[in-house]
Image (tube, rainbow, N blue to C red):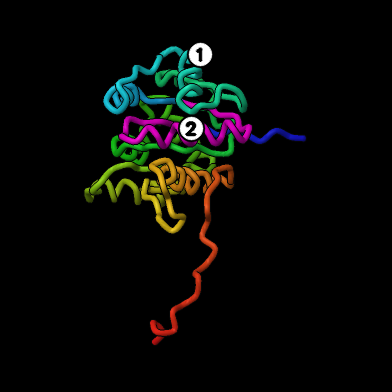
Protein backbone atom coordinates (compact mmCIF):
# COMPACT_ATOMS: atom_id res chain seq x y z
CA UNK A 1 0.00 0.00 0.00
CA UNK A 2 1.39 3.40 -1.00
CA UNK A 3 1.94 5.74 1.91
CA UNK A 4 0.15 9.10 1.67
CA UNK A 5 2.32 12.06 0.84
CA UNK A 6 3.34 14.26 3.77
CA UNK A 7 1.58 17.46 4.81
CA UNK A 8 3.64 20.62 5.20
CA UNK A 9 2.57 22.67 8.20
CA UNK A 10 3.65 26.27 8.69
CA UNK A 11 3.17 28.03 12.03
CA UNK A 12 3.59 31.79 11.89
CA UNK A 13 3.66 34.39 14.63
CA UNK A 14 -0.07 35.03 14.77
CA UNK A 15 -2.10 34.60 17.93
CA UNK A 16 -3.93 31.29 18.18
CA UNK A 17 -1.27 28.60 18.36
CA UNK A 18 -3.97 26.23 19.60
CA UNK A 19 -5.03 25.91 15.96
CA UNK A 20 -1.63 24.46 15.07
CA UNK A 21 -1.60 22.20 18.12
CA UNK A 22 -5.00 20.70 17.29
CA UNK A 23 -4.08 20.24 13.63
CA UNK A 24 -0.94 18.35 14.68
CA UNK A 25 -2.96 16.24 17.10
CA UNK A 26 -5.46 15.05 14.51
CA UNK A 27 -2.98 14.55 11.68
CA UNK A 28 -0.55 12.52 13.78
CA UNK A 29 -3.35 10.48 15.32
CA UNK A 30 -4.55 9.66 11.81
CA UNK A 31 -1.06 8.50 10.89
CA UNK A 32 -0.02 11.34 8.57
CA UNK A 33 3.56 12.48 8.11
CA UNK A 34 4.15 16.13 8.94
CA UNK A 35 6.92 18.47 7.85
CA UNK A 36 6.66 21.42 10.25
CA UNK A 37 8.33 24.81 10.19
CA UNK A 38 7.60 27.49 12.79
CA UNK A 39 8.62 31.10 12.22
CA UNK A 40 10.85 33.00 14.60
CA UNK A 41 7.89 35.11 15.73
CA UNK A 42 5.96 32.00 16.81
CA UNK A 43 8.47 31.54 19.65
CA UNK A 44 7.40 34.91 21.04
CA UNK A 45 3.73 33.99 20.73
CA UNK A 46 4.28 30.82 22.78
CA UNK A 47 5.75 32.98 25.53
CA UNK A 48 2.92 35.51 25.33
CA UNK A 49 0.04 33.02 25.19
CA UNK A 50 1.30 30.16 27.36
CA UNK A 51 4.43 31.39 29.12
CA UNK A 52 6.30 28.53 27.43
CA UNK A 53 9.61 28.57 25.58
CA UNK A 54 9.56 26.52 22.41
CA UNK A 55 12.90 24.79 21.71
CA UNK A 56 14.92 25.84 18.68
CA UNK A 57 16.60 22.49 18.06
CA UNK A 58 14.45 20.47 15.59
CA UNK A 59 14.66 17.23 17.60
CA UNK A 60 13.59 18.94 20.81
CA UNK A 61 10.92 20.88 18.98
CA UNK A 62 9.41 17.63 17.69
CA UNK A 63 9.07 16.39 21.26
CA UNK A 64 7.63 19.77 22.26
CA UNK A 65 4.87 19.72 19.64
CA UNK A 66 3.98 16.12 20.41
CA UNK A 67 3.68 16.94 24.11
CA UNK A 68 1.50 19.97 23.40
CA UNK A 69 -0.71 17.91 21.09
CA UNK A 70 -0.85 14.96 23.47
CA UNK A 71 0.32 12.51 20.81
CA UNK A 72 3.63 11.02 21.92
CA UNK A 73 3.53 8.24 19.33
CA UNK A 74 1.99 7.76 15.92
CA UNK A 75 2.38 9.44 12.59
CA UNK A 76 5.66 11.08 11.66
CA UNK A 77 6.75 14.57 12.63
CA UNK A 78 9.85 16.33 11.38
CA UNK A 79 10.57 19.91 12.39
CA UNK A 80 12.79 22.34 10.52
CA UNK A 81 14.67 25.47 11.49
CA UNK A 82 13.00 28.58 10.15
CA UNK A 83 16.25 29.69 8.50
CA UNK A 84 17.01 26.36 6.83
CA UNK A 85 16.10 27.33 3.26
CA UNK A 86 17.93 24.23 2.05
CA UNK A 87 15.46 21.86 3.71
CA UNK A 88 13.49 19.31 1.69
CA UNK A 89 10.28 21.38 1.74
CA UNK A 90 12.11 24.28 0.08
CA UNK A 91 12.22 22.37 -3.21
CA UNK A 92 9.43 21.70 -5.65
CA UNK A 93 10.87 18.25 -6.27
CA UNK A 94 9.83 17.26 -2.74
CA UNK A 95 6.30 15.95 -3.12
CA UNK A 96 3.58 16.71 -0.59
CA UNK A 97 -0.19 16.82 -0.26
CA UNK A 98 0.07 20.56 0.16
CA UNK A 99 0.69 23.06 2.92
CA UNK A 100 -1.37 24.66 5.66
CA UNK A 101 -0.17 27.86 7.33
CA UNK A 102 -2.04 27.85 10.64
CA UNK A 103 -2.32 30.37 12.18
CA UNK A 104 -1.13 32.83 9.55
CA UNK A 105 -0.10 36.37 10.48
CA UNK A 106 -0.80 39.33 8.25
CA UNK A 107 2.95 39.84 7.90
CA UNK A 108 3.27 36.35 6.47
CA UNK A 109 0.27 36.93 4.21
CA UNK A 110 1.91 40.09 2.86
CA UNK A 111 5.21 38.34 2.16
CA UNK A 112 3.52 35.41 0.44
CA UNK A 113 1.42 37.78 -1.66
CA UNK A 114 4.61 39.63 -2.66
CA UNK A 115 6.46 36.45 -3.57
CA UNK A 116 9.06 36.95 -0.84
CA UNK A 117 10.92 33.99 0.64
CA UNK A 118 12.94 35.35 3.54
CA UNK A 119 12.66 32.13 5.58
CA UNK A 120 11.75 28.47 5.14
CA UNK A 121 8.05 28.92 5.90
CA UNK A 122 7.68 31.52 3.16
CA UNK A 123 9.78 29.53 0.70
CA UNK A 124 7.80 26.34 1.35
CA UNK A 125 4.53 28.21 0.77
CA UNK A 126 5.88 29.78 -2.41
CA UNK A 127 6.82 26.30 -3.62
CA UNK A 128 3.21 25.11 -3.23
CA UNK A 129 1.97 27.95 -5.40
CA UNK A 130 4.55 27.54 -8.14
CA UNK A 131 3.99 23.77 -8.26
CA UNK A 132 0.21 24.15 -8.35
CA UNK A 133 -0.27 22.31 -5.06
CA UNK A 134 -2.78 23.27 -2.38
CA UNK A 135 -1.75 26.13 -0.13
CA UNK A 136 -4.18 26.78 2.72
CA UNK A 137 -3.84 30.03 4.64
CA UNK A 138 -5.63 30.42 7.98
CA UNK A 139 -5.46 34.12 8.86
CA UNK A 140 -6.06 35.02 12.49
CA UNK A 141 -6.62 38.76 12.57
CA UNK A 142 -9.48 41.17 13.09
CA UNK A 143 -10.49 43.54 11.72
CA UNK A 144 -8.93 43.22 8.26
CA UNK A 145 -7.52 46.42 6.81
CA UNK A 146 -7.82 47.15 3.10
CA UNK A 147 -4.17 46.13 2.73
CA UNK A 148 -4.89 42.79 4.43
CA UNK A 149 -7.86 42.17 2.13
CA UNK A 150 -5.88 43.01 -0.98
CA UNK A 151 -3.04 40.71 0.03
CA UNK A 152 -5.48 37.88 0.75
CA UNK A 153 -7.15 38.49 -2.62
CA UNK A 154 -3.76 38.29 -4.34
CA UNK A 155 -3.10 34.93 -2.68
CA UNK A 156 -6.55 33.64 -3.63
CA UNK A 157 -5.98 34.72 -7.24
CA UNK A 158 -2.68 32.83 -7.17
CA UNK A 159 -4.49 29.65 -6.13
CA UNK A 160 -4.31 29.68 -2.34
CA UNK A 161 -7.33 28.72 -0.27
CA UNK A 162 -8.20 31.28 2.42
CA UNK A 163 -9.80 29.76 5.52
CA UNK A 164 -10.22 32.47 8.18
CA UNK A 165 -10.22 31.31 11.79
CA UNK A 166 -13.99 31.82 12.02
CA UNK A 167 -15.91 28.94 13.65
CA UNK A 168 -19.54 28.01 13.11
CA UNK A 169 -22.12 27.11 15.74
CA UNK A 170 -24.39 24.66 13.94
CA UNK A 171 -22.30 21.77 15.28
CA UNK A 172 -23.28 22.91 18.79
CA UNK A 173 -19.81 23.53 20.25
CA UNK A 174 -19.46 23.05 23.99
CA UNK A 175 -15.77 23.90 24.48
CA UNK A 176 -13.07 26.14 23.05
CA UNK A 177 -11.58 23.04 21.45
CA UNK A 178 -14.87 22.42 19.62
CA UNK A 179 -14.64 25.90 18.09
CA UNK A 180 -10.99 25.44 17.18
CA UNK A 181 -11.57 21.98 15.72
CA UNK A 182 -14.19 23.33 13.31
CA UNK A 183 -11.60 25.65 11.77
CA UNK A 184 -8.98 22.89 11.71
CA UNK A 185 -11.42 20.50 10.01
CA UNK A 186 -12.39 23.02 7.34
CA UNK A 187 -8.71 23.81 6.74
CA UNK A 188 -7.79 20.16 6.25
CA UNK A 189 -10.84 19.71 4.03
CA UNK A 190 -8.99 21.83 1.47
CA UNK A 191 -6.34 19.09 1.24
CA UNK A 192 -8.95 16.34 1.01
CA UNK A 193 -8.16 15.20 4.55
CA UNK A 194 -11.02 14.19 6.85
CA UNK A 195 -9.53 13.23 10.21
CA UNK A 196 -11.21 15.63 12.64
CA UNK A 197 -14.33 14.36 14.45
CA UNK A 198 -16.85 16.98 13.43
CA UNK A 199 -20.60 17.12 13.35
CA UNK A 200 -21.03 18.28 9.78
CA UNK A 201 -24.07 20.06 8.40
CA UNK A 202 -26.69 17.55 7.27
CA UNK A 203 -29.41 19.93 6.21
CA UNK A 204 -32.14 21.77 8.04
CA UNK A 205 -34.61 20.26 10.46
CA UNK A 206 -37.59 21.37 8.46
CA UNK A 207 -39.29 24.72 8.12
CA UNK A 208 -41.87 26.02 10.52
CA UNK A 209 -45.00 26.40 8.34
CA UNK A 210 -45.76 29.70 10.05
CA UNK A 211 -42.50 31.09 8.62
CA UNK A 212 -43.25 30.17 5.01
CA UNK A 213 -44.17 32.99 2.68
Name the residue: 31% across, 46% down.
151
Name the residue: 44% across, 18% down.
81
| Residue on which the image places disc 2 | 9
Above or below — where is 147 with respect to 62? below
Name the residue: 74% across, 34% down.
2
Name the residue: 62% across, 26% down.
74
Most extreme residue toward the right is 1
Position of residue 109 in the picture relative to residue 66 (left or right): left
Is residue 213 or residue 135 the one in the foreground?
A: 213
In x, y percent, where is residue 82?
41, 21
Indicate whether residue 16 is drawn in magenta: yes
What are the residue bounds of the magenta stretch? 9-36
Question: Looking at the rendered structure, which numbered label has been put on residue 59?
Answer: 1
* Mark 2 Cα shell of 10 Å, populated few (<14), some (14-19), many (≥20): many
In x, y percent, where is residue 12?
36, 31
Most extreme residue toward the front is 174
In x, y percent, where is residue 102?
41, 37
User: Which image quadrant: the C terminus?
Assistant: bottom left
Is residue 113 or residue 15 the one in the foreground?
A: 15
Element carrying mark 1: helix
Amino acid sequence: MTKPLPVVLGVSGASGLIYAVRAIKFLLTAGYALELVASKASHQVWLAEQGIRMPVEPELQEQFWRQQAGVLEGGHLRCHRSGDVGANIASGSFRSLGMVVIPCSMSTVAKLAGGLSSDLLERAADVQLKEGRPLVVVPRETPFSLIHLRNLTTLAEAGARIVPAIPAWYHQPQTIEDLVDFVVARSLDQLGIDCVPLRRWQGGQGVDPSLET
